[in-house]
Every structure is written in structure tokens, then in C-alpha cells.
Image (tube, rainbow, N blue to C red):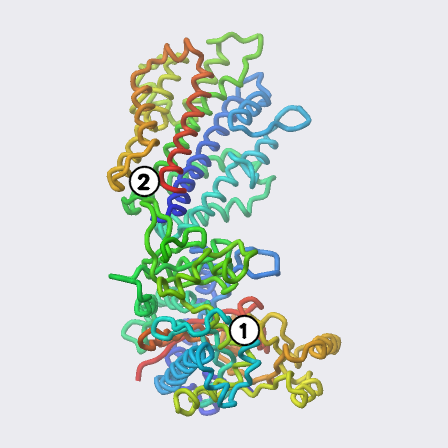
Amino acid sequence: MLSRSANNLFWLGRFMERAEATARMLAMGQRMAMLPGSQGQVEWASIMQATGTPLPENGGAVTEADIVSSLVLDNHGASSIQACLSRARDNGRAVRTALTQEMWEGLNEDWRYLEAMEPQAARRNLAPILEWVRRRTAIFKGCVETAMLRNEGYDFLRLGGSIERANMTLRLLNVKYFLLLPETEVVGGGRDHHQWMSMLHAVSGLRSYHHYYDGDYAPWNIADFLVLNQAFPRSVAYNYSQIDASLTRLQQSHGDTHTCQRTAHTELERLSAMNINEIFNDGLHEFLNDQIVKTGRISQEVSEAYHF
Amino acid sequence: MPFNEMEESSGIRPPYRSIADWIRETGTDLLDRRRAEAEAIFRKIGITFAVYGEGGDPERLIPFDLIPRAFSAAEWSILDRGIRQRARALNAFLYDIYHRGEIIKAGIIPSELVYQNAAYLPQMVGFSPPGRVYSHIVGIDIVRTGPDSFQVLEDNCRTPSGVSYMLENREIMARMFPDIFTGGPVKPVDHYPDELLRTLKEVAPAACDGEPIVVLLTPGSMNAAYYEHSFLADLMGIYLVEPNDLFVEKARVWMRTTRGPKKVDVIYRRIDDDYIDPLTFRPDSMLGIAGLFDVYRAGGVNICSAPGAGVADDKAIYIYVPEMIRFYLREEPVLENIQTFQCSRPDECAHVLANLADLVVKEVHGSGGYGMLIGPKSTKAEIEEYRLRILDDPANFIAQPTLDLSTAPTLHNQEISGRHVDFRPFCLVGKSVRLVPGGLTRVALQPGSLVVNSSQGGGVKDTWVLQE
């Protein structure tokens, strides 16, 4: 396929996944802010930091209105839902011939829906809108799974999705780093616990976690679940296995081996051999940042290998 | 009174009988609901059309009128002959002006109209494109003024757009009203993409060995007609490429793919001449494929339409098309031209200036209904302003009488009444000449309006060609 089309599909995958991840992160923020004594400001600020969104210039408190204007209805920000869906559509539009009718119509409808949304309405209905984003991105993925040809176009789309999802789970965990506990609270206390639980909630992993770790809500278990668990589809390790699988399929159909395949494979093996205590001993935040950089490198290597 | 295509004094005209029955049985209420549904479907699919310089909705819909426009088999046989004839003559003309220029030597067309034409490309002189075809898709705009009179308004020899509406309008009608097509007399149009691909493959360049690789070259997704580009590429199953996807190496054209370079044989381009090759045409162009033109001249690739084909659809050349038909084909023109005054001729210019209030005045190189004056619909001030423009550069203008365009029934504000229509068929020229029975009917939605251009608030209709 055209290299440009591969690039468009790769980024279509990334932007759809990012729109969903931002929605999940915001739902987490709302949940964290519900705790008694919370004003929401710290939680929202930490989410903006984790997504790389600039904080308000006046240095004042971050409100839900700021969140809506910078992460929901902003047309330019890197993680804003509207910007992601609009760029997903632009990328889809450039490769319309590689999409199914349903995929395209979905992208077009999503874009039109947010395009027509008033900021006030968005503030009043933040929770339903975040719910809507999760539903719409799920429908899109359903259309991909049930009707898209299993050719290299599918692999590039999936590859973009897996890279983005690994990246966003890393960023989600970073929210906890930015979210300093008030001095009156202790690590492992009620607020700390609630924040970890909100994280599980955001990735729709509450029940699976319970099933896996027998109801023991310990931060290291939750981190293990989100980073190293190979069965949970939003974990970093799982997504690396998907990156590896997509790249292997591309390698098989093209017959060439590239740096990106070696990097992804090495990373997958490293993650498989790790245990969460090592990560905590060396510092979770350092691990997360390091892994965000590595994920970015694979993305770069993919574009070099396929002449994007 | 304009010619009413549906009704005459003695009743409903035969081609419209089934349509009239259908309207009566369906009722305007239901038709209006269906119209809203059709619009929703068009929006959902994203069949939109960006309008230059108008602001507002960047992805506007062209309004779709549900009531089809119909031609009888007898009417179509005239159109069919006339359209093919014109398409052949225009291609013969293009070959001639880039070779011996016989028609100029014979004194039929003034040489300056050709050789000093902005669209004339000296780089094309002496070169013969495959099959001697320059314009592979000829869009001919036709109006009707009476039961037996069809006239050509203008020719489009470069990259006429609108064929996606011909296909989508039929598709949507069939989706909403399947009953009227079942076993009915309406000839299908959905083989157009196959015919187009066949045409493009027929004109593969000399260097092509094996099955020709055809691509559609678009300026990109920001272009007003991008929907059509992707739609056609999809239906033909060919690559939709942008200029940056192509490059020249070893005297061939290649596209960048995930598996490395892939050879390209035929480029169906939907970008203008100026933006094809910055080395040959416009050094400042951001678009374009450096070196493409040299490969083209060496027979390594074909470009459809050929660079320089625009001379044939110039409005100053238009006047001579009937003469071309006689000169090259030794036939009498089947379709008439509209009487046209050239402001470059002092006597005709004087006539135009004296009668501005009754005439339609157009720029010679203009298109799409931009920058024209419709005398009867203009204010005194507008006419005087336009007069100054003509006086400033008379050769840049032509004028035609305001025509009583035929009307076809159209749904407007839940009522059905006549609106002026025109017609654009798409004639394909490769080794043979092909014409799908149908085309794009454009309709001026405002009561009494004569402007059908989609950029000026016109709408579209499904066009039926009926069997015997």
C-alpha cells in the first residue's frame, strides 16, 4: 500500500485510541474529585500534566471548565478529545478507500457531533459525553474487527492503536505520581486507596483485577496489573505483545526485517521477565517515563521502516 | 415561456408519465420526509462539496432534489450521437493544434486564439499521446430550450467533476424508492467506473508491459472535489495518490509504498496543468512531481487528461466547435451551439455593450459560474460596473443571449413546481468512445433562477434515460 496511506492508518489508530484514553482519564479525574474534601483542582491538574497539556497560565486552580476547554473541546491540543477525533477523521478521509463504509461513517458522525457541541452543554454533560466517547470508539473498533480486510492496512491501524494504548496506560499511571497526597493523608490511607481504585475503574479493570488478585487492593498489585499482566488488554505488556504481533505479521507479508521489529521484541521479552518489585525499587515514575520514551522510539522506527 | 419537460398543453409528456404517477401516489408529504432522509444520508456518508470563498460550512451539501429528470429513448439517441461526435472532434482539434495546425492554416480558427491561449502548452508540440487522445473524459454542458432543441453551453475537457453525483443520486433513489426501478424502463449507470477504468487502461503508455497500473492523482483531502476522487478510486479499485506519493526515477514514474517503489503507468489526474511538474510548468508549485513531464514525453507514463487539453474548452474556442466537427469529421453537428458574441470583435462588442441588460456575459477563461453577469437579473449599478470591466479588456469576455432553459418538476417548500435545469453527461474517450446513458442534471433551486452551478446554490437530480 502507499506509504502515506500506511501512515494515515497508523495515526487513525493512534488518535482513536487516544480519544478513548483521554475520556477514560477524565472519568477517572471526576471520580477522584468526588471524594469528600477534594476540590477537584489537584486531580484535574495532575491529569493535565500526565497528558502533557499546559496548565492555565495564571497558575490558578484548574477547574472542570478548564478541563472541558483544553481536553474535551479544544481543536488543537495533543490529547483533546475533539482534536483527536477530528485528526482521526482527517487521517481516515485521506485513506477513505482503505476504510469500510461503516468505519468512515462513524468517523464522520463523531466529528460532526462534537463540532456542533456548545462548551456550556459539554460542561453540564461531561459524564455522558465521556461515556459517549467510550461507546463510539468501541463501535469503531467493532467495525474494524468485523469487516476490515486483514491486510497490511489492518496491521498498521492496529499497530498505531497498540502503541497509543501502551503509551496512554503509562501516562495514566503517571497521574498518580503528579497527584501528591495532602500532608494530612498517608500513603496507603483512604484517599490513596480511592485514587488507585479510580484508576482501575477508568480502565474498566475493577472486576478483572478482583478476579486476578483475589480482592487484595495493593498499589503494587494494581501497578502489576496495569504494567505487566499479559492477560489484561490495557496493560503495557499486553499491548507490547500486540505491537510485536502486528510487526511480525508485517514482517511476514513484506519479507523484510526492520529495527522496529527487533526493538519491540526485545522490549516484550524484557517486560515479560520483570516483576513489579523491581520496578517499585527503581522508582515507578522513572520506569514510566523511560517506557514512554521507548514506546515513542518504536513509533519512530515504524515510520522509518515503512517510508512514512 | 420556458419549455416544461413534464407537462405540455395536452397533458403529461410520455417520458414523465411514470414520474407523474409516482409523485401522485407518494404525495408531497412523504416526498418531503424522504428528502430530509436523503439529506441525512448524504451528510452521514460525507458527500460534500466545499465552496471557494463563501465561508460558512466548509463541507456543504449539494442539495439533492428527489424528482428525477427523464429523457426518452428517442431524445437520448440524439444526445448520444451529439455528445460522442463533439468529444471526437475536440480530441481531433487538440491533436491538430499540437501538430500541423491544419484548421488554422485553413483559416477556420484564428491562430492567436490557439497559440496565444493561456492553456496552450508549447511543450506539447509534436508529441502524440497514446491513441492520440487528449481529453479522456469530456463533460459537455447541455441545455434544452424546446422539445427538439438541445444546445451546448460549454465543453469541459480537463477534469470535469460531478460524475460521483450521477452515481450517488441513482444509488440513493434506488435505496429510498426501490419500487420505481424494479423491472422499470430506467437504464443503469453504475457501470461508469468500469468503463472509465477500461478507457484509462486502453491508453497505457508504450513503456507499459503487462497489466497497466492506473492511479488517480488528487491534490489531497482539502480539495473541494476530494469526495469524488476517493469515491471513483474506490469504485475502480485503483490507488488514490497525492503528488508527494509519486516520484520519477530511471525514466519511469513510481509511487512510494510500504514495500518500496511501485511503477505507475497511467495517471488519471484531478489536478491542474500548472501543478503537474514544477520543473516544466511552475517552479513555485508546492504540488507536482518533478520530472514527470519528461517521462510523459518519452512514453514512460500517460497523463489523463493530457497537459494542454484546456485549449479545447476555452470559451473563445467554443464558438468554433461546430466548424471543427465539419472540418475533422466531415459531419454536420448534431448539437447546436448557443449564439455567442465575442467582445474581442469591435462590432460584436458594441452590440454586447448596448444590450448588457438582456445578455449573459462570461469571462473567456472563467468556470463554475464565477465572475459572470446575468443581465436580466442584475441591478443597473452591477451592469455599469461590469461594463467597465469589459471595456478594460474586451478580449476577455464573451456574451450569450439569456436562454429560456427548460424546467423540470422540483420539490421546494413542500410544493412541486418547475425549476430550470441543465445537463452534464460524461463521455469517455480511449481506443473507443463510451457514453453511459445518464449524467448529472443540475437544477437552479431558486424560483426563476438560471444559475445551476453548485457553487452558486444549485442542486442536483437523478437523471433517467428510458428504454424504448
Residue at image position (46%, 65%) is B35
Whole-angstrom CA distance, mark 2 to mark 1, is 45 Å
Image location (x, y in percent) of residue B316: 56, 80
Residue at image position (30%, 84%) is B468
* Pick the front one: A68 or A10: A10
Q: Is residue A98 above or below residue A15?
A: below
Is residue A292 in view from this perspective?
yes
Density class for disc 1 (Cα within 10 Å; few <14, some 14-19, many ≥20) is: many
Density class for disc 2 (Cα within 10 Å; few <14, some 14-19, many ≥20) is: many
Image location (x, y in percent) of residue B392: 71, 76
Give left or right: position of B228 versus A120. Answer: left
Q: Chain of mark 1?
A: B
Image location (x, y in percent) of residue B117: 56, 75
* Pick the front one: A269 or A212: A269
Q: Is residue A97 above or below residue B402?
A: above
**Amino acid on which the number 1 mark rests in the picture:** Val
Image location (x, y in percent) of residue A259: 34, 31
Q: Quadrant of the C terminus of chain A?
A: top left
Q: Which residue is mark 2?
A: A155
Q: Is residue B118 above or below residue A80?
A: below
Q: Chain of mark 2?
A: A
Give left or right: position of A91 versus B359. Answer: left
- Total marks placed: 2
Which of the numbered marks, if any, corresponds to residue B452?
1
Residue at image position (37%, 24%) is A236
**Amino acid on which the number 2 mark rests in the picture:** Asp
Which of the numbered marks, if any, corresponds to residue B379?
none
Judged from the image, the secondary structure of the residue bearing numbered disc 2 is helix
* Pick the front one: B244 or B369: B244
Is residue B16 in view from this perspective?
no
